[in-house]
Image (tube, grey):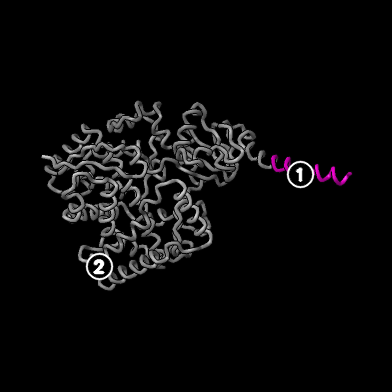
Amino acid sequence: MDFVVEMLIAPLVLILMLFDFFNSKWECWFRLNIEGPEPNIICGNIGSVALGRISFVEMVNKFYREWRAEPYFGIFVWRTPVLIINDLNVVKYILLDNAKLFATPKLVIGRGIIHQNSYKSCGTIDHSKVLETVLTSEKVRDMFDLVIRSTNGRQETLNKIIKGKGVVDCSQFAEYFTTEILIHCVFGVDGNSPMESEKIRTIIRGLCGPRERYLYPRKLCVILRVICCHLGVKENAKKWEFFVNLIREKIKHREERNIVCPDFIGVLQDLKSRTHGDNLEWTDDCFLASEAIAFLITSYNSSVLLITAVLYELSINQEVEKRLRTEIRETLKFYNESNCNVLDRMEYISMVLAETLRKHPLRPLLKRKLNENIQIEKSQMKMPRNTRIIIPVSSIHHDEKYYPEPNTFSPERFSIEEINRRNSMTFLPYDGGATSSLGERVGIRITKLALIFLLKSFRLNPTKINYHSYLKFQKVPVDLIPSE
């Protein structure tokens, strides 16, 4: 009899222990006295995301609207607790005042392994910090001038993708335009090497191009990439070897002939001649290739996404497009050339791009992870080490408290007077928040050049296609009409 009782009690105890184990995780935010939506015992707060009904960004936007009265609130991504920050003072504390306390997802590149969202710090390199050691403001400006000259020298090539076409896919144009510029400015390949250019163009699209459109194939690709990264499997082995050999040959060719050029290969030449303080010699070809790929990915992605979004907005906001075309034509007519100084004098184009970045930020969510236990000043919030944090950039950019009528495209929001009236933390369009990386700055320059190239000769008309469904996957068709 005792044996039978024990056999009946044992499963019950096991069930209670499992229930307590799973339930204890959900008490994380309760113990810290942080409010938040009630989680589901199976997948936390991301049930709709897991079922493919909405995206993760849309889910965060929904929770932001529900909990905007709180300075912060907690959710669960599966069983992982994640803190969403609403208060701009706390955002400033994380991004500016104490940025060193918070780990940023890094682009991990090395010997055939490319993983874009890793918090891993041991053995990884912050590529943006490395470039800062050799890139002076003068070198950056020279590189930008090279980008402009490259665009001017490729007018006929770029005309091929729009010649004879009424409707043009903005994302296709953005990919082609960006790739043409980067082939020349990053790898130093000129128009006399068509086969080499085509091979680089194919590899760039493979590394940086759009992934699967649908939720589950896309998630599966991400999971497989993470597994490959942790196991050391070379997902891009052939592409990696190609880039390593290309960088090696270009640098060797220039060193033998004493060639100096203000492109990214020239930057890598300077980097190769230096030695890091941690006894890491910056002479390894694989290291130099990783720097080139990191720059390539950030500049390509920011340029393609921004060109696609701004062309979409201009096509449905004809008055803004008309005013921008007028500024471009008058400025080019007055200076009769294109360089960094001329681009910087175009105020309205900068306002248009800023408003585009507000509506379509490069990073809709900024992710951080806390490195140590802290208590935020002027706040009762205590955060334990390894807390995952999300700053809902898209939600802040569409908050009526900061931007009245947030769905209206209005570049005037970014006049000097309007900018000075707002908290600087209400505009966080880049991966680093309010500050942009070199790749993102190059992407913005390329976008300006794309606008100049198109608008000085064409008008943009919207098609009768549902834009929002296309914009979700960066497929935005517009009608190009020659302007008078």
Which disc is residue 259 wearing?
2
Residue at disc 2, secondary structure? loop
Position of 251 relative to 128 (above/below): below
- Residue 456 percent coordinates (x, y): 16, 43
Q: Is residue 383 left or right of residue 127?
A: right
- Residue 474 percent coordinates (x, y): 33, 44
- Residue 41 percent coordinates (x, y): 61, 38
The foreground one among 268 and 106 is 106
Of the residues tagged 2 and 1, which is closer to the observer? 1
Residue found farthest to the bottom: 256
Which residue occupies 35% across, 39% down? 469
Give the magenta part as a residue range. Answer: 1-19
Picture quarter with the N terminus: top right
Which disc is residue 196 wearing?
none
- Residue 379 percent coordinates (x, y): 55, 32
Which residue occupies 51% across, 30% down? 71
Which residue occupies 30% across, 29% down? 417
**Do we see residue 435 in this rendering?**
yes
Task: Read off the residue under disc 1.
Answer: 11
Q: Amino acid type of disc 1?
A: Pro
Queried whether the magenta region covers residue 7, the answer comes back as: yes
